[in-house]
């Protein structure tokens, strides 16, 4: 089967224009029209006006590792274009359902969205899309494609190339690098090199030589293709998962105020997972009954490294039954917990899922006798 990609545009800086109150989304279908100008594409068919309007596009020959590649793609723009800072679980589901509805028609998918919460959305999709056997690549831009300085065309073209590869997982592609989505954090809100994967190398690296794109795939990092049909796990209609950022001098009452309405809590702790004993005591008081039991996950506030129970200041959390999040990013821990909570399984089953490496999102440390000064 020849490569065929569906580009899903949800909104974001990529297709914004200047408005009275600052940057705002351009009219629907304007982005599809602009793509044929800023990327080496030509419009094959005008957008239809059906339930799912598509713009059919095709690249002229693109050189990949000195071989010719023709990218066949359709562009679907969401009915309601949205700034990613306003995205929530509902929009994640819309993206996932769009992929599922078109899964048999395409060999790969590219999701173009705003950069503010792309690390959250892409990580969420990596869990929600169960048995994913095709590449789903998230991308966007720091500068709109309606601006001559835009990084959007390059990001999109690289993402289209990655979408033709045999990589059965969700990726985030930016500035000629494609990372595993569940490992990514946004590092910079201005520069083009906006994302990084602190605890894992890029899965794909692209380099433009002026004649051809050289593509390097770290095959040993690519997840094994799963068996079974694609399934979308929907999120809970009312999110009951949140973050508790530990800070110096935090009082037990501040802990209780944050977690009282939550059933899943990601603890952002110091160093390798350390907290004041007062925090542990407050969490014990808020642990809940069997029906309202809270699931706590411990991840570090540091960008690199992992939580352990090597220090006395972290043993209290482990004894309380808090899940070790190892080197998961905040975004991965939060979206994984949302996903697990949506399963509505028994508490112990949810806890077991959080402890397991489901999508390559973390490295479990078998030996915790690690000390850092």
Image (spheres, grey):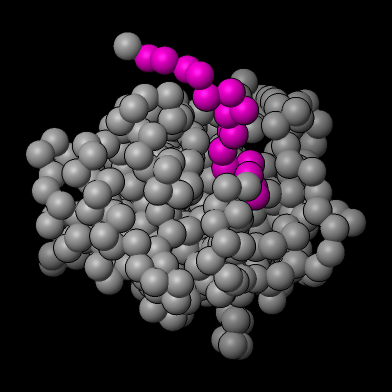
Residue 100 in percent (x, y) is at: 68, 71
Find the residue positioned furthest to the right: 1
Find the residue positioned furthest to the top: 373
Side (left or right) of 354 relative to 131: left
Closer to the camera in the image, 295 or 91? 295
Which residue corresponds to the image point at 41% horizontal and 67% vertical from the top-left?
293
Which residue corresponds to the image point at 59% horizontal and 33% vertical from the top-left?
363
Tell me where residue 234 sits by quadrant: bottom right
Find the residue positioned furthest to the bottom: 50
Tell me where residue 106 sits by quadrant: bottom right
Residue bounds of the magenta highlight:
357-372
Q: Is residue 61 visible?
A: no
Residue 101 in percent (x, y) is at: 69, 76
Side (left or right) of 61 relative to 198: right
On-image quarter of the C terminus: top left
Closer to the camera in the image, 61 or 215? 215
Image height check: is 58 above or below 204?
below
Residue 324 in percent (x, y) is at: 48, 41
Which residue corresponds to the image point at 28% horizontal and 62% vertical from the top-left?
286
In reply to whether residue 362 is colored magenta, the answer given is yes
What kind of secondary structure does the magenta stretch mostly adopt?
Answer: loop
On-image quarter of the N terminus: bottom right
Q: Is residue 261 visible?
A: yes
Image height check: is 274 above or below 229?
above
Closer to the camera in the image, 13 or 146? 13
Image height check: is 153 above or below 365?
below
Residue 291 in percent (x, y) is at: 45, 76
In reply to whether residue 99 is colored magenta, the answer given is no
Side (left or right) of 128 relative to 247: right
Closer to the camera in the image, 368 or 30? 368
Which residue corresponds to the image point at 45% horizontal and 30% vertical from the top-left?
308
């Amino acid at each position: 089967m020849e490569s065929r990609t569906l580009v899903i545009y949800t909104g974001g800086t990529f297709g914004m224009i200047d408005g009275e109150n600052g940057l705002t989304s351009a009219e629907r279908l304007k982005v599809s029209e602009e793509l044929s100008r800023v990327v080496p594409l030509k419009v094959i068919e005008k957008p239809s006006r059906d339930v799912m309007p598509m713009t059919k596009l095709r690249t002229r020959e693109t050189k990949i590792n000195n071989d010719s590649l023709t990218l066949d793609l359709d562009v679907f723009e969401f009915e309601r274009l949205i700034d990613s800072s306003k995205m929530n679980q509902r929009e994640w589901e819309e993206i996932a359902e769009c992929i599922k509805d078109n899964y048999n028609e395409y060999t790969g998918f590219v999701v173009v969205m705003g950069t503010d919460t792309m690390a959250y959305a892409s990580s969420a999709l990596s869990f929600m899309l169960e048995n994913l056997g095709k590449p789903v690549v998230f991308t966007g831009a720091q500068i709109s494609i309606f601006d001559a300085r835009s990084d959007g065309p390059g990001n999109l073209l690289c993402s289209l190339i990655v979408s033709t590869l045999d990589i059965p997982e969700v990726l985030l592609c930016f500035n000629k690098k494609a990372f595993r989505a569940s490992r990514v954090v946004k590092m910079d809100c201005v520069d083009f090199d906006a994302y990084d994967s602190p605890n894992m190398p890029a899965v794909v690296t692209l380099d433009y030589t002026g004649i051809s794109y050289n593509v390097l795939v770290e095959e040993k990092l690519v997840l094994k293709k799963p068996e079974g049909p694609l399934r979308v796990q929907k999120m809970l209609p009312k999110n009951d998962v949140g973050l508790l950022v530990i800070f110096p001098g935090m009082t037990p009452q501040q802990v209780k105020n944050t977690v009282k309405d939550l059933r899943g809590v990601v603890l952002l702790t110091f160093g390798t997972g350390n907290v004041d004993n007062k925090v542990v005591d407050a969490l014990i008081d808020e642990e809940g009954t069997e029906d309202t039991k809270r699931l706590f996950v411990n991840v570090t506030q540091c960008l690199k490294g992992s939580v352990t129970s090597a220090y006395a200041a972290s043993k209290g959390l482990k004894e309380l039954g808090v899940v070790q999040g190892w080197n998961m990013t905040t975004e991965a821990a939060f979206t994984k917990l949302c996903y697990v909570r949506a399963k509505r399984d028994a508490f112990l089953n949810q806890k077991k899922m959080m402890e397991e490496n489901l999508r390559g999102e973390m490295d479990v440390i078998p030996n915790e006798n690690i000390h850092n000064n």
